Image (tube, rainbow, N blue to C red):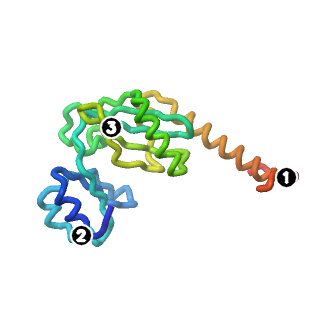
Amino acid sequence: MTNDPAAARAFLAVRRLTVYKALHPERALWRETRLVGSAERRALGAVRIAPVIFQEHVLGDRDVRVTVVGEELFATAIEPRGAAYPWDYRFSWAEASVTACCLPARVGRSVRRLVDRMGLSYAAIDLRRRPDGEHVFPEVNPGGQWLGFAERTGQPIAAAVARLLVGGLRRARDLQRTGQDGRRQGPVENP
């Protein structure tokens, strides 16, 4: 991620295929992930205006979204089925094959370690599986969407989110009742 044109040029100079994502907080300004072409290379001076995410484009046979909710991992395979736009599955969501899948144990452990190190209790992690079976990690979103994946796969993500929220509420009540030092503080109103 950069808004430095020189850093962007240096990154692009050593990678054959690169994609980019503009950062826009407003839904109306959302843009899909795009392949960096000659027009974008000529316009790199514009990254001074706002940060842009550049990523090496990883060739793969499927994208995998891992929704982490507390201790639970929900993996979803997204295969665009010959989509006309292979750089962002969201453009071919309706036509894509979207199914629950199992992560290799090593990948699951890596996902768990990442989320733990980041101190997150929820995360949406994007992976790309290469044709050789290796999973590549491009990004984690600590507030990524999950509903569409749950609807398409039947995974009980909503129930897991509810359990996580209720557990957090219980811990907050317990802390409020006992105080930080563990001593009981007296009656507590419903928070």
Coordinates of residue 35 in the picture (x, y in percent): 20, 51
Image-based side of 35 in relation to 2, left or right: left
- Quarter containing the N terminus: bottom left
- At x 29%, y 41%, the residue is 89
Distance from Cα at disc 2 to Cα at disc 1? 56 Å
Q: Residues within 10 Å of mark 3 (few under 14, many from 20)?
A: many
Coordinates of residue 82 in the picture (x, y in percent): 19, 33
Q: Nearer the viewer, residue 130 or 142?
A: 130
According to the picture, the residue beneath numbered tag 1 turns out to be: 183
According to the picture, the residue beneath numbered tag 2 turns out to be: 5
Mark nearer the N terminus (3 vs 2) = 2
The circle on residue 73 is none
Coordinates of residue 110 in the picture (x, y in percent): 44, 40
Q: Are marks 2 and 1 in contact (CB under 8 Å)?
A: no
Q: Amino acid at mark 3?
A: His
- At x 27%, y 51%, the residue is 33
Q: Nearer the viewer, residue 72 or 145?
A: 72
* Secondary structure found at label 1: loop
- At x 43%, y 30%, the residue is 105
Q: Are marks 1 and 3 in contact (CB under 8 Å)?
A: no
Image quarter for residue 40? bottom left
Above or below 54: residue 47: below
Distance from Cα at disc 3 to Cα at disc 2? 30 Å
Residue at the far left: name it: 38
Image quarter for residue 29? bottom left
- At x 33%, y 37%, the residue is 135
The circle on residue 135 is 3
Mark nearer the N terminus (2 vs 1) = 2
